[in-house]
Amino acid sequence: MKNQVRGKCVVELGSGCGMVGIAAAMLGARTTILTDLNYTLPVMKANVEQNMPNIHNKQIVECVDCDWFNPPPLSELVSGVGCDEYDVDVILVADCVWVEDLVTPLLRTLRLYTDERANDGNDGTVWISYQQRGARAHELFWNGMHELFSSVVEVDISSLVQSSVLHIFACRR
């Protein structure tokens, strides 16, 4: 994953406590924008601050509110943090499909952000780590991913973990 984020502008959706976005920063992302609902930001910011000694001092790591039911435009999300919507190279989504009611808003947000990037010719990758949970949420997400992206490739992680329910996908519009 190091080469997928090094020197790039990375946005993580549904960051929770921020560990995946922090890992991207540690792997050399130029700018990392961690997003989630406002109530998660204090813990996320504390985790970023605690891990800053492991992140090069010229890198930017920001925590930003993003509600999938009313997502801000990508240009607003990245405003003032060292990249614009056309510079967003990578979008990360880590273990965000666990409640059926969130699947459609997540897919709608991914469509909005990948559409904005595509308008400038940026077809950057969306990396999705996914653990299958409920059957209905899985069906909605699986079908939605294949409708949204022209390419959904499962990454072989068998050398890292032995699991039939944990998956990583590289997705492109």
Image (cartoon, rainbow, N blue to C red):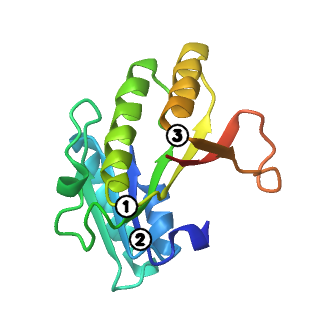
Q: Amino acid at mark 3?
A: Phe
Q: Is residue 126 left or right of residue 33?
A: right
Which sits in the foreground, 113 or 13? 113
User: Residue 22: x and y, percent?
Assistant: 44, 64
The residue under label 2 is 51
SS label for mark 2: helix
- Side of 86 where 107 appears, left or right: right
Q: Which residue is mark 3?
A: 149
Q: Tell me whether the residue at label 2 lies in contact with that at label 1, contact meaning CB atoms closer than 8 angstroms.
A: yes
C-beta proximity under 8 Å, tags 2 and 3:
no
Q: Is residue 17 visible?
A: no
Please tell me how many numbered marks the rendered image carries: 3
The residue labelled by disc 1 is 47
Quadrant for the N terminus, please: bottom right
Q: Nearer the viewer, residue 154 or 100?
A: 154
Q: Position of residue 67 (x, y in %)?
A: 25, 37
Depth check: give the residue in front, 58 or 7.
7
Residue 82 drawn above or below residue 158: below
Q: Position of residue 35 (x, y in %)?
A: 31, 50
Please identify, in this view, whether the residue under mark 1 or under mark 3 is nearer the observer.
Answer: 3
Q: Alpha-carbon distance for marks 2 and 1?
A: 6 Å
